[in-house]
Image (cartoon, helix red, strand yellow):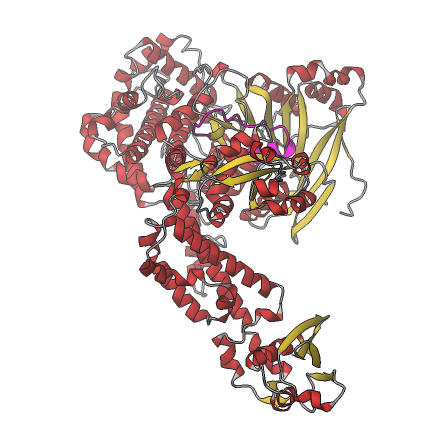
Amino acid sequence: MDNGSSKPTFWPWGIDSAHSASSASNAFDLGEVASSDARPFNPSEFLIPGWKGEGLITASAIVIKNSLNNLTIDALSLFKKSCSTSKSMKQQTYNEFMHFADYAKLDKSLLGQQNDFWLHMQDETSPLKKHLDDFVKIHCFRAVAIYLFRIKFILDLSKEQHMEVTEAILLNPLSFLGKIFKKDSSTELMAESLQINQYSWYRPSSEYKDSLLKLKDAFESITLTELIKLISTPKDDKIYSIRDYSHSLSHLSFGLMVNELLIKLPSWLHPHSKAKPLITQKVCLLPKTINTRFSGNNVSSFALSHWLAQETNIKVSQWDNLICPEFEGLEFIDGQFLKICQELQFLSFLTRVAVEHKYEIIPFICKIMKEKYQTSPEEIVGSQASFFNLGNVSLNQNETLYHRIVLNLTELPKTNPHHFLIQQIQSQKNLLKNDGMIFVFTNQKLFVPSHSERVEQLLKDFKVEASFNLEELKGKGEIAHFIYVLTKRTASLNLNKHLLFEMNKNVKESCLSFEFKGSLSRFNKFNKLVEELQKFIRQKNAVTTPIYINEIEQDISFEFHQDAIIEGKLVSSVTSKDNGHVPHPRFFKNLTESCTSLESFFHIEQITPDDFLAMKKSVASELLGLKIGPEKQYPLLLIVNQTEPLDVRIELTTTDSYRAKVEQYGTAFFNYFGLIPKNQVINLNVFREFFSSPIGHQIIQMQLSDGPTKLKAKLKSLLIPNFFARTQFMPAELQNAFRLLDINVGELKSQHPLELQSHFEQVKKHFNQNAEAYPWHLLGLLSHFKIQLKATLEEFGANKANAVNFNNPLITEGLVKLKTQAIYPNNADVYIDYKIKTHEELQLPLTSTVLKNEGEEAVLILKYQDKDIVHLHASSLINHFIKFILQNASGVKIADILVNLRIPALADLTTVTKNVEQLKNSKELLLKETEELISAVLRNQISR
C-alpha cells in the first residue's frame, strides 16, 4: 500500500549500513589506495551511480544509538532482579535462553529445568558463565530496543493527538497506553507486543528520565527503517551475527515487487471474485485488512524492504487494501524479538497512515488490530470494512488466520529438498483463511517430473495460480530463483468439482508463467522489472493475454505466457514466441455535514424505453385529454453509466436527447432518469462540474458502485454540496472583477495571451475572498469559462481555419508587417471565378459573403442579394482572411473590391498564424488553472 521520504539504508559501495564498521572502513581504504597513486583521487569512481548519500548515519540516529547503548547498560544492572520477579517471567526468560542455546549450538545438558538456569545465572564460577553473559547482553539489548519502539509509538501517537508526554509516561509506557486503549472497551488495542512477554520487564531507571525526553526530536526525524538497523544487533556481538542480512531482499525495489504480488496480483488473477461492498449505513469505510505472515529465511530483510515500500506508497490517495504484517522467522535471530519489534513498528505506521488519509487515529488503529487477531476464518464481506460488526478476537497465535503467507525457503537441506519444500507449504494450510494465498520464494523447482505424484498431492489442497522464474536473472543477489503463488482450495471445492483429481488424472489447470531474464549490472535496475510487472498487471488481461515479451533493456527482458498443469507437471502451452478516494472518517463526517441529497434539488423518476414509447401520463394530463411524454414531463435527463463497476459515471443533459442516447449507449449498463428541478434557479453546469470532479467522482463510487439494484433510491440519496442551493449572486461591483469568466468563445479568441493571463490573475487575486461568500455564483462562472476554453481548444485541435481570430493582437502584430499583393488580375494563391453574364453586374454592391469548404480548399462567394457574382477559390486560411477583411465592406462595388483588395502571400500568412500554437498553449494553461480553482471551491466548501 504506500513515499520515498524514507532513506535507503545501504552504503554507497553496496555494503549494508548495518554491517560492521570495519566494512565501511575497508571501503574508505579504497580511497586511500587511490589517493596514493599519481592520479588525483576521484570519489565518484567508488560510488554506485545515482547514490546521493542516503543511508549514512544521521545525527538523530546517533542520539538514539547512544541512548540505546546507555539504556542497555541500565538493563544489564536490572536484569537479575527484574526477570526473576515472577514465575511466568522466569519461565519466559528460561525459554528464551533455550532458543539462544539451540541457535548457538550450546550443550544444554546442565540446564534441564528452569531452576538450573537461574542457579547457573547466580553462580560466578559456572562453566556456562560466558554463554550466559552473552545471552544476558543480547536479551537486555533486545528489551531496550523493544522499549524504544514502544516510546516511538507513544511519541507518534501523542504528537497527532496533541497529548503532552512527560518523564513519567516514558518511564512507564505500558501504563500510559493502557489508559488510552482501555481493556474491554471499543478502544481496546489487541496487540501481542503490548502484552507481558519476555522483554516487557525493562523500565528505565529514574536517573535516565531527563535524557529520555531528548529522544523526542530524534524520533521525529529518524525513519523507521533506520531505527530497525540500529536495533538489529549489539555493537560487539560475535554470536548474534548480522552476516545473513541481505542487500537485495532489503531493497526498496524488492519490497515494491512483494507489495505488487500481495495486493495487485490476486485481484488481477480473479477480477470477478471481489464481492460487492455492503453499504447499509453511513459509516466510515476503511481499507480491507490483508493479514499477512512472513516466515522462513531472511525475514528481517523482508521486513526492511516491506517498510521501505510502505513508506514509499503511504501518500497514495486511496488504499483499498492494507497489509497487516507479521514477521517471524525460523531461527532465533528472526524469532519472537523480530515479531514484537515489527508489530510495534506497524502500530507507529498505522498512526502515520491515519494522519495521511485523515482517519480518526485511535479507532482506526484499534479496528485494524482487532481484524488482525480476528478468530473467525470467514472473510469480511467486500473489499471495504466498516467500524462495526467485528467477530471474536484473540491474541492466541494458534487461532490467527492469514489472508496471505510469504514463505522464503532459500536455505534448503542438501538431501531431499523437494520433499522439504512440499512439507513446508503443506504446514501453512491450517494458518490460511479460505481462499488465502501463499507466496513461496525458493531456489527449488516445484514442478520436477520425477516428483509429480508428490505435487499432485499438494494440488489437492492448493491451486498454483502463477509461477515466476528468475533463474536466468543474474545479479539479483539473494532473491530466490522461483516464486510460486498458490491459493488454498476451499472445502466445498475439494468435495465437489476438484474430486476430478481422483476421477480423472488428465484434468488440466491453467498456470500463468512469468520470467525475468538478463543481467543486472547494478541491483537498482531490478526496479525496471518491477515497473514492467506493475504495468503489465495494470494493462493486460490474465485470461486473454497468451504471450507477452518485452526487452526492457539490451540485457534485461520480461516474459509472460500461459502454462498448464497436468498430472502434477508444468507443461508450457507456448508453441512459438512470435509475440503478447475511499472517504476517511473525518472527510466522511464533513460530507454528511456539508452535503444534502440529490433529491433536494430534483424530482427523480427512472425512464425506460417502454415509458418513452407509451408516452407516460400524469393524472392531470389524463383529465385534460393530453399525453405528455418524458421529454415534456422531465426537462432534464440524468444517465448513470455502470459499464465499469469501479468507475461509475454520471451524465446530465436534456431529455430531448433521450432517443439518441439510448441508441448510442443501449440499456445494458446505462440507466436513465428524468429530472424535474424543484427550484427556479438551477445551474446545470455546477452539477456537471461536481459529478466530474475528483470529490464528486469519489462520492459516486461510494454510493452507486454496487450495481443497478435499488439504483433509483441510491441516486436520490447521492450527496450533493449544500451550497448548490444557496443561489446567491455577487453584487454588480464584485462581478466586474470576474467579468473575464463570462466571455464567449469569440471574445476569448480575440484577446492577446498576455492580456488574457493578466485578466485571469485579477480573477485569482479576488478568488479567495469571494469563494467563501459566493461559491455557487463563482463556480457557475468558472464552469462557463471552462466550457468556452474547451470549445476554443477543440477548434485548435481540429486545425480549423476559423480557429484563427485575425483581430487577436498576437496575430495582428504580425499581419501589419507583411507585404501584400492584389488579387486581381493575377494572384498565385487566389483564383477568381466569375458567375456573371455581363460586366455591368460587377458594379453591383456587395451585400453578403458565404464561405463553403470543398476538400482542402474553400470557396468564398461574393453576393448581391441572392445572386452569386464572384467565386474566390483559395486555401481555407486565405478565404477566412478575405472574409475577415470584407466583414465591413457591405455596399462597396464588387469591382472596386476586386481591384483594390490586397492580401499577403499564403506562405507569409501561414507563418504569422503559427502564433496560434502560442494561443493554444495559453488556453491550455488557463484551462488547467480554471480546473484547479473549481476543485478549490468544491474542496473548501465540503471540508469546512
Say which of 456 and 625 sits in front: 625
Mark yes or no: residue 726 visible: yes
Percent position of residue 174, x then y: 29, 22
x 52%, y 19%: residue: 401
Mark yes or no: residue 910 visible: no
x 55%, y 69%: residue: 917
Residues rendered magenta in the picture: 261-285
Total label count? 0
Can you say whether 865 is above or below 756 in the image?
below
Percent position of residue 558, x then y: 66, 45
Percent position of residue 4, x then y: 44, 45
Say which of 800 and 846 sits in front: 846
Image quadrant assignment for residue 413? top right
Majority secondary structure of magenta residues: loop
Determine if the magenta segment contains residue 542: no
| Residue 440 relative to residue 338: left or right | right
Image quadrant assignment for residue 168? top left
Residue at the far front in the pictured view: 624
Q: Quadrant of the C terminus?
A: top left
Can you say whether 465 is above or below 554 in the image?
above
